[in-house]
């Protein structure tokens, strides 16, 4: 009896093997059936996308949607293409039509609303976009929606809302927004300065430093506020703090420092401080401020000496221009030809420098003539270098 029972056991493995084989065949058949329901136009569209032919991709995806009107993914792909090609009205219409479909599940409805919100954002309809993004109370969309809301608030210059949103994003994602939050406080302070509310401005600037102790802009503005009402010593102490925050920004306050030192009848102390800064950080803007002040305070001889020493330490066309200018002014030899030569040399140097010095955004490459805390092109904060760079310098370094 026991032997018969063991024979039965031996039959079990082949049975399972057969069952598994059948199951596998069924799965494969199903897979083939599913893939053939994807219209050929879909793959055509993907090909156009890969080769960045967006207009042709739009046509192919439109055709694919005709063949398969139920596919939400296809609609989303087409919508995102519409946004990219600037046809936001077509994207908006398509998503609004989709929302009217009764057979959408609640989850699908939220997904369509998220797409529609992006359409509105791209179209610049910020109020409608804001409303929809706020309405996306689904875990999956929370962080992207907050990112988009933050973008809207920054563009609309709604700084208080931007601070709230960035703080919430920081809490949810763990990604720091300190630099941005401090800049939003500085923007609030700027508004207070414009409307002549210095007390409020100071409070907002202290908030900025609370958010980011390395916020240079807050100290620049705190110094400005104090200097404006004659508190030059306090102004100087704020500007001096920049050295311990980000010394590469010292050029932004070089002239301000000299002015406040002059106002407190200590112009030499200002020159000494700037000289130390120049020695330690070698910033061209510090050299410019120092050269001009030396020329005004101590005359052309001293200015020429300063430029010569700096030129030995760090050759640059800007300093050579300064040296030639000071030499032309201090030339007391009376020889007409020599002063003409100097003028000629200076002219040549000026031509070589041109006025190509500019601040280049390290995020998008935008070229700005003036320093901006926020890049006018890509809206990134503190993305411009603290010192302008000359195109000629860049070419020279590339040639090396
Ligand atoms: Zn930029």
Image (spheres, rainbow, N blue to C red):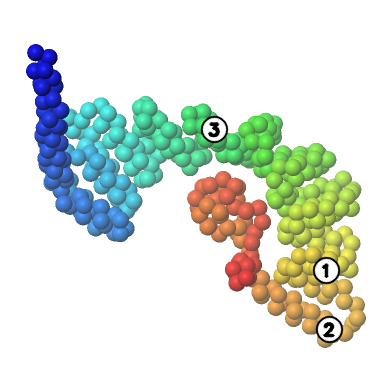
Query: Badge 2: how crowded within 10 Å, few (<14), some, or many (20+)?
Result: few
- Give the alpha-carbon distance from disc 1 to disc 3, as whole Å: 49 Å
Q: Residue furthest bottom?
A: 337
Mark 2, secondary structure of its residue: helix
Residue 123 picture quarter: top left
Determine if residue 155 is in view: yes
Does mark 1's beta carbon lie closer than 8 Å to ligand 1? Answer: no
Of the image marks 2 and 3, the number of the one nearer the N terminus: 3
Q: Residue 131: x and y, percent? A: 38, 32
Mark 3, secondary structure of its residue: helix
Q: Residue 356: x and y, percent? A: 61, 67
- Give the alpha-carbon distance from disc 2 to disc 3, as whole Å: 62 Å
- Give the alpha-carbon distance from disc 1 to disc 2, as whole Å: 18 Å
Question: Mark 1 against mark 2, which lies toward the viewer?
Answer: 1
Determine if residue 227 is in view: no
Of the image marks 1 and 3, the number of the one nearer the N terminus: 3
Residue picked out by circle 1:
308
For residue 163, which numbered disc appears in the image?
3
């Amino acid at each position: 009896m026991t032997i018969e029972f063991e024979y039965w056991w031996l039959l079990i493995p082949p049975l399972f093997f057969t069952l598994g084989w059948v199951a596998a065949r069924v799965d494969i058949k199903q897979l083939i059936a599913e893939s053939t329901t994807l219209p050929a136009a879909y793959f055509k569209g993907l090909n156009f996308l890969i080769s960045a032919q967006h207009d042709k991709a739009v046509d192919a995806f439109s055709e694919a949607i005709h063949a398969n009107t139920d596919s939400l993914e296809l609609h989303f792909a087409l919508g995102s293409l519409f946004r990219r090609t600037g046809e936001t009205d077509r994207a908006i219409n398509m998503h609004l039509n989709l929302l009217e479909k009764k057979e959408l599940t609640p989850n699908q409805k939220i997904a369509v609303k998220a797409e529609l919100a992006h359409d509105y954002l791209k179209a610049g309809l910020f109020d409608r976009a804001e409303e929809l993004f706020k309405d996306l109370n689904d875990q999956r969309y929370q962080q992207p929606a907050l990112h988009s809301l933050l973008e809207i608030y920054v563009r609309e210059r709604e700084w208080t809302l931007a601070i709230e949103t960035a703080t919430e994003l920081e809490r949810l994602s763990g990604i720091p927004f300190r630099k941005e939050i401090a800049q939003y406080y500085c923007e609030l302070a700027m508004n207070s300065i414009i409307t002549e509310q210095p007390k409020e401005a100071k409070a907002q600037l202290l908030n900025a430093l609370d958010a980011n102790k390395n916020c240079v802009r807050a100290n620049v503005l705190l110094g400005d506020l104090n200097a404006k009402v004659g508190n030059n010593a306090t102004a100087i102490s704020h500007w001096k703090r920049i050295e311990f925050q980000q010394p590469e920004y010292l050029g932004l306050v070089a002239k301000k420092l000299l002015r406040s030192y002059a106002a407190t009848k200590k112009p030499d102390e200002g020159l000494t401080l700037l000289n130390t800064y120049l020695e330690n950080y070698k910033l061209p803007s510090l050299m410019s401020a120092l050269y001009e002040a030396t020329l005004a305070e101590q005359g052309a001889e001293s200015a020429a000496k300063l430029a010569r020493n700096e030129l030995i330490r760090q050759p640059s066309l800007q300093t050579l221009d300064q040296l030639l200018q000071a030499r032309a002014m201090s030339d007391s030899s009376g020889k007409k030809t020599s002063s003409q030569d100097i003028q000629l040399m200076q002219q040549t140097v000026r031509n070589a420098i041109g006025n190509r010095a500019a601040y280049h955004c390290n995020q998008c490459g935008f070229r700005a003539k003036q320093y901006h805390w926020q890049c006018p092109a890509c809206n990134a904060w503190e993305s411009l270098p603290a010192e302008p760079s000359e195109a000629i310098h860049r070419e020279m370094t590339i040639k090396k």
